[in-house]
Image (spheres, grey):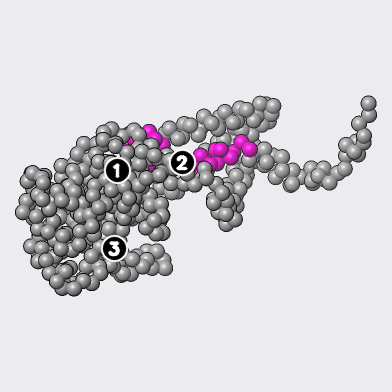
Amino acid sequence: MKRFTLDSILCTVFIFSILGFFASLPLLKIFDAFDPVGEMFSDFELTDIVFSQLRDEPIADEELVIVNIGELNREGIAQQIQILNKYNPKAIGLDVLIDEPQPWENDSMLVRVFKETPNLIVGEKLVDLNDEGTEFTRILRAESHLAQHVDFGFVNLITDARTQHDLKVCREFTPKQSVNGDMRYSFAVRLAMAIDSAKTQRFLDRNNEVEIINYKGNVINFVSEDPRMKYFTLDVYDVLDENFTPDLIENKVVIMCTMGRFLGDVLTREDYYFTPMNERYVGKAEHDMFGGVIHANIISQIIDEDHINSMPANASIILAIILCFINVFFFKMIYGAIPKWYDGVTKLIILTEVFFLATLMIYLFYDYNYKADFTLALIVIALSGDAIEVYQGVIKNLFSKRNRKEIFKVNKKFWEPVRN
């Protein structure tokens, strides 16, 4: 039994060695361009099904209102803020980067309105990450004459996109970030602080560098005619024409952001993202959420104290090693006891294990807001059956002098002509 257990351990090491070898091959990336199926699933995670299909209809968050600024210039934005101020909002967040110098006549109204607006948070962007990837070195924000009367929060969202037109899938965000030793807080965190500072501080006390966004809902989806919504939304001229009731704004947090030239503008791509709430969770074709709405989801998550916890990377690796060893141990027993049944039985066991782990991932995420990472475990389980045959038939024979000779031994009978 000791020898059998040691052999199982060596086989487990062999499986992980195979994974490490293939993962280190840069040539494998060449095939990505010829793999339409892989490309279709590259932006998909199993937990997306929970957001996209399993979550109940969201209830509107009455703490937040989203305002579309469309293509308004600085004077138009100032007019919107001036109107909103009349209805006593709790705070206003301007999710717009105002970093380009403008003539004084273009900024004069904005300066005056900024000065008159209490609890105004304006977006800034952190740029130029240092070589160690630990902190940013520069901030893009409004010039000093605009900045002196407002507070700032960074609007950076985490995606894999390199340019504005790339696929931008947003699942996570950074609550705080160091910039040349100065701690900066995200746009959503600064606005959440205006709603409930105690809850926001408890969120920050989690001290996670990256948080998973627990998406609550969207604004009306005009593209798919999906009736689901979460946030009350005003279009550009709804505000300018004061086409709303005072209670919609009073004592609420207002997020002003770009959502196209008008609500439902399907041509815009500015500050527009794919999220796990996308109805097409595999092979996404249409963006589904604007950046300002993502910030609203983060605020709701903080205020509801409905956070997602995730499995540590070390735990994921340890689990994969344990499951791999268990599979190897029992598969080797099957290999020795009933070799003719080996392929069919092991394939059936593997399919059952994969289905169980995938279902468990969805269940933990749906019921407990826990994101279990079984990806490595699923891979080694899928490989274990065939890897054992390679280990038994090739690796072990390479370490046997007698078996190595069989590779070079010519079986003369094989070359004899078949006699009738």
- Please tell me which residue is depicted at 31% across the width and 34% down the height of the picture: 55
Crowding near the residue tagged with mark 2, few <14, some 14–19, many ≥20 C-alpha atoms within 10 Å: some
The residue carrying mark 3 is: 125
Expressed as whole percent of the image width and height from the top left, the position of residue 59 reads 21, 36
Q: How far separated are the C-alphas under marks 3 and 1?
A: 23 Å
* Residue 77 relative to residue 33: left or right: left
Badge 3 vs badge 2, beta-carbon distance below 8 Å: no
The magenta-colored residue range is 361-386
Q: Which residue, given by chain and number where applicable, does mark 2 sit on?
A: 374
Seen from the viewer's position, the closer of residues 266 and 194 is 266
Q: Amino acid at mark 1?
A: Tyr
- Tell me the residue that label 1 is attached to: 215
Q: Earlier in the sequence, mark 2 or mark 1?
A: 1
Q: Secondary structure at mark 3?
A: strand
Corner quadrant of residue 222: top left
Residue type, numbered disc 3? Lys
Task: Report the quarter where the C terminus lies.
Answer: top right
- Decide if residue 25 is on the left or right side of residue 141: right
Magenta span dominant secondary structure: helix
Q: Is 377 part of what is drawn in magenta?
A: yes
